[in-house]
Amino acid sequence: MPISRRLLSRAVLHAILVLGAVWALFPLVWMVLTSLKGYAEASAAESLLPKDWLFSKYIQAWQTVGAFSSDDLKDLFPSFIDHYPQAGNQVYSLAFMRSLEVMYYNAEMLKAAGFDQPPATWDNFLKVCAAVNSLDVDQR
């Protein structure tokens, strides 16, 4: 009995979806399994599965889980903390990656344009830009 064209196309589609899922999930599986290995075994990379499963790291982490202490928070910029939900005035999570917003400026150029300090708002920023743009080229 011949295979219908529709059945064949669905089988190919399912095979592609399964392969795509394996391809997408493999890094996550590899990362978790590697974290359960000791350092020497992880760097040797002989097998995907660990020889000795080291759950002790995870057990220790869950036993010490909780809010960041005030000493922990002293090491962080306030802008890294103030955007995240807190419970009971305690910080329980931070973003994996976060950028620090910084503005560099030329103090002499601002002074020549009539400003003593950098702008604090977008409206002031536009005013400073217009004033600096109106300076002679030698003053910039």
Image: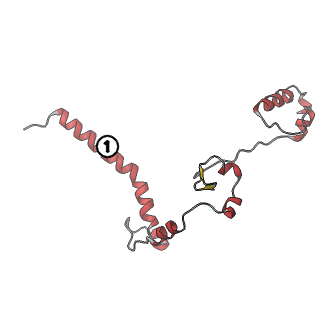
Please identify the quadrant where the C terminus is shown: top right
- Give the percent coordinates (x, y) of residue 130: 83, 26
- Give the percent coordinates (x, y) of residue 36: 44, 68
Dot 1, crowdedness within 10 Å: few (<14), some or many (≥20)?
few
Q: Is residue 14 left or right of residue 117?
A: left
Q: Name which residue lies at 39% across and 54% down.
A: 26
Q: Is residue 74 left or right of residue 137?
A: left
Front in this rendered view, residue 117 or 91: 91
Examine the image and state in which quarter residue 109 appears: top right
Secondary structure, mark 1, is: helix
Check disc 1 and give the amino acid type: Leu
Q: How many marks?
A: 1
Examine the image and state in which quarter residue 15 appears: top left
How did the renderer colour the structure? secondary structure
- Give the percent coordinates (x, y) of residue 93: 58, 54
Q: Name which residue lies at 89% across and 29% down.
A: 137
Q: Is residue 134 above or below residue 11?
A: above
The outermost residue toward the front is 88
Q: Is residue 87 above or below residue 15?
A: below
Q: Name which residue lies at 35% across and 51% down.
A: 22
Q: Is residue 22 left or right of residue 70?
A: left
Q: Kindly identify which residue carries mark 1.
A: 17
The outermost residue toward the left is 1
- Give the percent coordinates (x, y) of residue 68: 62, 61
